[in-house]
Amino acid sequence: MTPEPIARGKVRELYDGGEGRLVMVASDRISAYDAILPNPIPDKGRVLTGLSLHWFELLKDIVPNHLIGARLEDLPEDLRAPENAGRSMLVKRLEMLPVECVARGYLAGSAWREYQETGMVGDHELPPGLRQGDRLPEPIFTPATKALEGHDENITRKLAMALVGVPVAVAMEQITLRVYLRAHGECAKAGIILADTKIELGKDEGGQLVLGDEVLTPDSSRFWPSDAWEPGTSPPSYDKQYVRDWLDASGWDHTPPAPVLPDEVVEGTRARYVEAYERITGRRFDDYLREAGVSEVGA
């Protein structure tokens, strides 16, 4: 019998893995406007896990990560259910920092809205006359506080220093920007623009900063096709923007419960997530599923 999770988020369940370890299982749930939608996106959790594994390997010279193993046989015996294949990670338990680490290289989302109002993003003063989607003169670090419910709240670097201390805040910023620059370069090779990304850092038993949770997935990052980027517009994204657009057109007032997604939106969203995986990693998603031991691949 599968044990009860010790915590459940919008997408993931966390289980006690014993001996200072956790098991993270990424579901296929999808949320929008702070509501979990009634129907899932097939294989979404496996895309998130497969991409995180890819990036953990590429970033380990910048920052260590919490991954111990991701095969079914790595998990505690009571969590080796076939449905967990390809979507589960055994990880070190960390003391997570109370600050989200966000790097932005382009003006989009909440940063674009803030810039229109103040000419700044966080405590970064930006040049006048920038347009939506413009590339910034250089990437910026814009921390946020974690919200248990609702949206995270953008904060200044000064407030981040007050929350975690100056040495940790400085290290967080350096790591976040190095991760962004490495990932931006790798994505560019695949014809993708990494507009922004959010990472989470925690401390291990020795007090070292460690990369946790997921990293550089469509749920935590804004990926744009390079050939569709045009400053002054909001480019299409390899994320749940497709779902948000349908929800907006449906007339839903963003008050739960959310409406059921039609089959074509579910299929279109899955296709965008899978395309993001394949373009970024250079591998077929079906190959990842086979290696992870997922049955009925391609069925």
Image: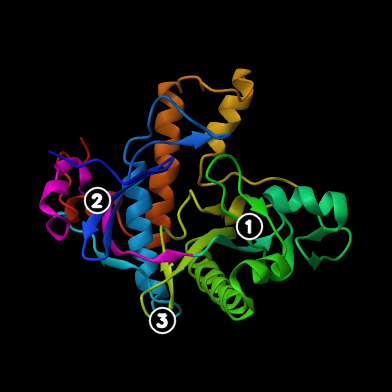
Residues in magenta, as a range: 73-96
Which mark is on residue 86?
Answer: 2
Q: Earlier in the sequence, mark 2 or mark 1?
A: 2
Q: Residue at x 49, y 62 (%)?
A: 200
Q: Earlier in the sequence, mark 2 or mark 3?
A: 3
Q: Which residue is mark 1?
A: 144
Q: Earlier in the sequence, mark 1 or mark 3?
A: 3
Residue 253 appears at what percent x and percent y? 64, 21
Secondary element type, mark 1: strand
Q: Which residue is mark 3?
A: 61
Give the Cα separation between the discs numbered 2 and 3: 24 Å
Q: Residue at x 40, y 23 (%)?
A: 263
Disc 2 to disc 3: CB gap under 8 Å: no
Secondary element type, mark 2: loop
Give the Cα separation between the discs numbered 2 and 1: 30 Å
Task: Say if residue 282 shows up in the picture.
Answer: no
Residue type beneath disc 1:
Ala
